[in-house]
Image: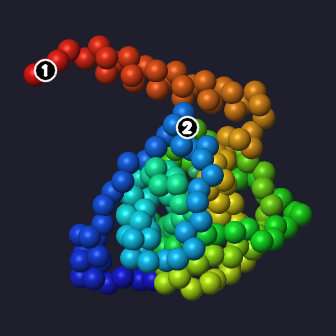
């Protein structure tokens, strides 16, 4: 959906950039609720998520990553300099996956600066409702297949590190828990400036 420059500006003013939650926030483990009906409130979430994702920047975002436990995902795989190509997915469901697999080095806005190889089905078919509430189906391969599965995982409380070996996962979890503790402690130590 290409947006002309003037139109885009008007479009942007109504949007808000939301805070992205990171490990070890327990909300990342929640199973998100189905939406079922796409109304203006859902479209507002979609638009804010898209803006938040572009700002991060990221290629995919699930609503729970901005603390909203609803089955909503935004994706845009367009590269810098290319026209934007946002995908809005409400209640997305993986209905088929290939036996053939692919390994991608994945990252996640909720697991900042950590990248690891994840093996997933190389192709998948996903059913969802679009921004207008219309039923859609997408058959994906390559990066889109990986991204769809990664984001839909979030709706089920699964983060990409959950696909790693126990040893690797524990190492990452420990690192983020330690960072979170340090953050809390440093806030506690900060002298009051009035
Ligand atoms: Ni992610």
Residue closer to the observer: 21 or 156? 156
Q: Residue at x 70, y 73 (%)?
A: 126
Q: Residue at x 31, y 21 (%)?
A: 187
Which mark identifies residue 27?
none
Can you say whether 1 is above or below 173 in the image? below
What residue sits right under mark 2 in the picture?
A: 26
Residue 182 at x, y = what percent? 43, 19
Element marked by disc 1? loop
Label 2 CB, ligand 1: below 8 Å?
no
Q: Is residue 22 visible?
A: yes
Can you say whether 39 is above or below 13 in the image? below
Label 1 CB, ligand 1: below 8 Å?
no
Q: Residue at x 45, y 83 (%)?
A: 1
Quarter the C terminus occupies: top left
Residue 171 at x, y = what percent? 66, 26
The residue carrying pointer 1 sits among few (fewer than 14), some (14 to 19) or many (20 or more) residues within 10 Å by Cα, namely few
- Along the polypeptide, which appears first: circle 2 or circle 1? 2
Residue 65 at x, y = what percent? 50, 50
The residue carrying pointer 2 sits among few (fewer than 14), some (14 to 19) or many (20 or more) residues within 10 Å by Cα, namely few
Element marked by disc 2? helix
Question: Which marked residue is nearer to the observer: mark 2 or mark 1?
Answer: 2
Residue 132 at x, y = what percent? 49, 84
Say whether residue 51 is left or right of residue 113. left
């Amino acid at each position: 959906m290409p947006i002309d420059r003037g139109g885009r500006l008007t479009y942007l003013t109504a949007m808000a950039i939301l805070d992205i939650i990171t490990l070890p926030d327990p909300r990342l483990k929640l199973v998100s609720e189905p939406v079922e009906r796409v109304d203006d409130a859902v479209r507002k979430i979609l638009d804010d998520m898209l803006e938040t994702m572009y700002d991060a920047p990221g290629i995919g975002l699930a609503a729970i990553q901005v603390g909203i436990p609803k089955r909503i995902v935004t994706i845009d795989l367009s590269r810098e300099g290319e026209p934007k190509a946002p995908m809005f997915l409400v209640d997305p469901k993986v209905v088929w996956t290939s036996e053939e697999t692919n390994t991608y080095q994945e990252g996640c806005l909720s697991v900042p600066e950590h990248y690891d190889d994840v093996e997933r089905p190389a192709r998948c078919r996903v059913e969802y409702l679009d921004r207008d509430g219309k039923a859609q189906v997408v058959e994906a391969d390559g990066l889109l297949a990986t991204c769809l599965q990664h984001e839909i995982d979030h709706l089920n409380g699964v983060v990409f590190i959950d696909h790693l070996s126990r040893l690797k996962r524990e190492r990452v979890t420990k690192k983020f828990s330690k960072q979170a503790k340090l953050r809390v402690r440093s806030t506690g130590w900060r002298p009051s400036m009035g």
